[in-house]
Amino acid sequence: MAKIQIVFAMTIDGYFPDDDRLMEWIREDRNGFLLWKQHSTFSIAPDYPMVDLICFKDTTSSDSIFQAIISEREDTEILRRLSVYHLPDEIVIYMLPVISGHGIRISDFLDSCSWNLHSSKSFRNGICRLIYRKTLQ
C-alpha cells in the first residue's frame, strides 16, 4: 500500500500564509517544495476523486508516495478532503515565523489522530520544517 504525504506551509497560529516573501522561498528554494516534488510517485490533483485514490493507493507498492503539495490558497481543499477520509500517512509542515490571525485556518482541516514527530529542521529565515508520521493504531 502506498503512502500519502501532504506538504504545506502554515503560520504559527495555523493559517495559510499571506507572507509572499516567505512563501516564495518555500516554493522556489531547493529545501522547500522542490525537495519533495522529486520524491513523489504520484501527484494528487485538487479534483482527483477520493474513492479512486483509496483504490489506487491499496493496489500500489509500499514504496510509492502519493503527494499533495498545498502551495496556493485554492489547494487547501485537498488537505480537507484527504483528512475527511483519514488518508494522510505523513505531513510535512513548513512553519512560518508569523502569526496571521485571519484567512483560511488550515490546521482545522488536519486529521484528529496521533502524529509522531519524525524530524525537524530550522532555516536561517526562521522557517521550521516539521515532518510528522501518523501513529499506528
Image (cartoon, helix red, strand yellow):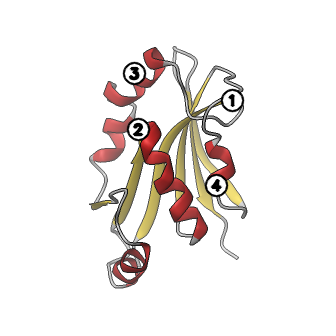
Question: Which mark sits nearer the N-terminus, 4 or 3?
Answer: 3
- Which numbered circle lies on residue 12? 1
Query: Percent from the top left, x then y, of residue 127?
Result: 55, 24
Q: CA distance from mark 2 to mark 3?
A: 11 Å
Query: Which residue does the numbered mark 4 point to in the structure image?
Result: 110
Q: Nearer the viewer, residue 129 or 22?
A: 22
Give the amino acid type for the residue marked by disc 3 in the picture: Trp
Question: Which mark sits nearer the N-terminus, 4 or 1?
Answer: 1
* Mark 3 residue crowding within 10 angstroms, few (<14) / some (14–19) / many (20+): some
**CB under 8 Å between callouts 2 and 3?**
no
Q: Nearer the viewer, residue 70 or 46?
A: 46
Q: Is residue 124 left or right of residue 25?
A: right
Q: Is residue 109 above or below residue 29?
A: below
Q: Is residue 32 above or below residue 21?
A: below
Q: Which residue: 58% across, 38% down?
A: 120
Give the amino acid type for the residue marked by disc 1 in the picture: Ile
Query: Which residue does the numbered mark 3 point to in the structure image?
Result: 25
**SS at circle 4:** loop
Q: Is residue 134 above or below residue 9?
A: below
Query: Which residue does the numbered mark 2 point to in the structure image?
Result: 71
